[in-house]
Image: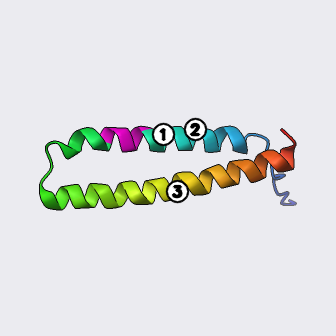
């Protein structure tokens, strides 16, 4: 029995990345609601997490640009 690797199908990467960006933005917005009820420590944790989320969004947007360029969108 021969093992065949699956071809690298990247045709839907842009769509998947855009969906991840949208979900991350929704998570940030939802966290703003929870800030109203959070303790000081929880607020700091939420703010720190949102900072990381924003960094992830920026990285995903750069990756979207790269993928789109490679796929010639």
> Which secondary structure dominates the residues rendered in magenta?
helix
Separation (CA) of disc 2 from disc 1? 6 Å
Query: Residue 21 magenta-drawn?
Result: no
Under circle 2, the secondary element is helix
- Which residue is rendered at x = 82% and y = 57% of the image? 5
Above or below for 2 versus 72? below
Above or below for 34 versus 1? above
Mark number displayed over residue 23: 1
* Residue corresponding to mark 2: 19
Q: Which residues fall within the magenta stretch?
A: 26-30
Quadrant in which the N terminus appears: bottom right
| Residue 47 place in picture, x, y as percent | 30, 56
| 6 sits to left or right of 25 | right
- Which residue is rendered at x = 22% and y = 42% of the image? 34
Q: Residues within 10 Å of mark 3 (few under 14, many from 20)?
A: some
Under circle 3, the secondary element is helix
| Residue 2 place in picture, x, y as percent | 87, 60
Among the two numbered marks 2 and 3 on one chain, the one whose residue lies closer to the N terminus: 2
Quadrant in which the C terminus appears: top right
Under circle 1, the secondary element is helix
> Are the residues tagged 2 and 1 within 8 Å (C-beta)?
yes
Q: How many labels does the image show?
A: 3
| 44 sits to left or right of 37 | right
Query: Residue 28 magenta-drawn?
Result: yes
Residue 49 figure quarter: bottom left
Q: How crowded is mark 2: few (under 14 residues within 10 Å), some or many (20 or more)?
A: few
Q: Residues within 10 Å of mark 1 (few under 14, many from 20)?
A: few
* Residue corresponding to mark 3: 56
- Which residue is rendered at x = 30% and y = 44% of the image? 31
| Residue 72 place in picture, x, y as percent | 87, 42
Of labels 2 and 3, the one closer to you: 3
């Amino acid at each position: 029995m021969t093992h065949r690797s699956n071809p690298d199908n990247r045709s839907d990467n842009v769509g998947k990345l855009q969906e991840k960006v949208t979900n991350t933005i929704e998570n940030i917005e939802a966290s703003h609601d929870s800030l109203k009820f959070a303790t000081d420590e929880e607020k700091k944790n939420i703010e720190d997490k949102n900072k990381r989320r924003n960094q992830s969004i920026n990285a995903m947007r750069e990756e979207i640009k790269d993928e789109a360029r490679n796929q010639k969108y």
